[in-house]
Amino acid sequence: MAAIKKDSIIEVSDFSLSIDNKSILKNINFTIAPNEIVAMVGESGSGKSLTALSLLGLLPKNKTQIDSGTIQFEETPLLDLTEKEWQQLRGNKISMVFQEPQSSLNPTMKCGEQVDEIIQQHFKNRFSAKERMTKIIEAFDRVKLPNPERIYSAYPHEISGGQKQRVMIAMALMNEPKLLIADEPTTALDVQVQKEIIDLLKELQKQTQMSVLFISHDLSLVSQLADKIVVLYQGKVVETGTPIDIFKNPKEPYTRALIQARPTPNKRLKKLPTIEDYNDDLVVNEYVNPKERSLRLDKLYAQQPILSVRNLYKTYTSSNGLFGKKEQFTAVQDLSFDLYPGETLGLVGASGCGKSTLGRALVYLDKPTSGEIHYKGQSLKDLNASQIRTLRTDVQFIFQDPYAALHPQKKIGNAILEPLDAHQILPQSKQKNRVLSLLEQVGLDSTFFDRYPHELSGGQRQRVVIARALAVEPKVLICDESVAALDISVQAQVLNLLNELQEKLKLSYLFISHDLSVVQYISDKIMVMHEGELVEYKEADELYRNPEKLPTQKLIEAIPSVIF
């Protein structure tokens, strides 16, 4: 952590803001000192990103009204700046790294060209093309990009998510800003890459002595980085303090809820506490009895498996041009496992290890190259097209991004009706009642039937996606990173819901994630994949207590932990 000087580089005083006459930020007060890392924490909709955009003058002009307060950057009152003055400040003295590097980078431009644009914009003709290229390659090297020359000439789709975020950090630091705003820069990344980015930001901050405003929903994560934490809830600052103050003596129920919502790997709670539980003073931490769990697992594994996979391979072939040499890439190799009725089988591994490929192969969305898959004792190789279609009603997917999974112009009720229509389940007269029943099952009332996806929160959208998957009464749910895009607090709600539904409907889950703390909480057994291979496969708690293989050990080390 940084050695803090006195005085403030940023001072926000009694700042209130409305959008379309709706009060969003209410009397926000906080300061950032030179050479200080401040973390701003809160769930989606708490006002974190709007606060950050206010510091950059990027608020929607026609809809925004400043109700009160001031924002001071050094000696400059920011709320009085003209657009031309903002342009001189942005990227020079205040820079920003956004949450999703894929949408922040132009897919039609090479990475080096995009950083070159920044230099030309701010330095005009001060550097030649060769000097600019040298500066960019040095910047890529500083953010620890492998082979900076290759990255310079690569398009965004040709590099990984973590590498894209490093390009964005290099771009933001190109002009040596005094303040870097990092808005959820690790949320879309797997836990190992997330740890690398956090370590990189700490190192760069130490080198450059800049101030950092780091925005996140994960208190455990920011405890490793911040000198000071500001907790936002419903547009208000509810608590401010050092990480030790916040974790050892949280004053507000909301802060306690954020601390407790992330699953703790060495403690197996029956139900994760949510923000609503803390606000209503209903928190009762009940732990799973190890003997009861052992008896349940014995009973579970005494059954015949519902899904058996043996020696599965999936190989992709690509060729360079019409007459080019063909190259093969094996995404899944020699994988064998069983899934039992009522079991949650966790599948964990770093991005690109083959987890999602395996999920698609299991229902022949992406047919395996070789190997055997048996569902209820029958080989999938023996099934015709009609039987494969029936299989896909029995095995349903819940995908990572609930917003992308729902049609933006379809009402929620119609989205859930779709699979009932497609698979001709129930007469039309009974379909609406079935949808209302499904909404109730996932904790949503009947008013959601006529709403659109953009009118729902991230957690509500994911509940709708779960309801749609349940519409065809499946036996198996493949949850592919189904909580990765959600706040820690909303994630707790969805994990609790999945557990409740499993108990009620006797479902089997293949739960795919890169976050071992989440997988260990919800799973009975865990498989660890690394570069397409199954490297470890054992009971969930035993795997966490006694990881034998290096990839498993690295995943455990990468879980954000509170060190005090």
Image: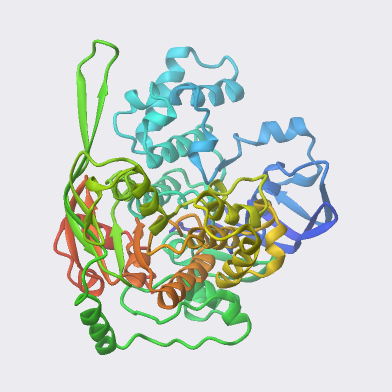
Q: Nearer the viewer, residue 334 or 449?
A: 449
Q: Tell me residue 478's x, y (percent).
A: 38, 57
Picture coordinates of residue 52 (x, y %)?
A: 64, 50
Q: Nearer the viewer, residue 425 or 356?
A: 425
Q: How did the renderer colour the structure?
A: rainbow
In the image, residue 211 above or below residue 236: above
How far across and how far down the image is residue 249, in percent?
Answer: 52, 81
Q: Quadrant of the N terminus?
A: bottom left
What residue sits 58% from the left and 56% below the top?
416
Q: What percent of the width, then of the height, locates residue 32?
A: 60, 56
* Residue sitting nearer the eye, 486 or 347: 347
Q: Residue furthest top?
A: 323
Q: How many marks?
A: 0
Residue beneath the point at 50% across and 78% down:
273
Question: Can residue 22 be seen?
Answer: yes
The reply to whether residue 553 is in sight is no
Q: Quadrant of residue 484?
A: bottom left
Tell me which corner region of the image, top left, top right, bottom left or bottom right, holds residue 289.
bottom left
Q: Which residue is found at the position 57% from the left and 87% from the top?
A: 282
Compared to residue 70, the image places residue 494 above or below, namely below
Quarter in which the C terminus is drawn: bottom left
100 and 321: which is toward the camera: 321
Direction from residue 399 to residue 60 in the image, left or right: right
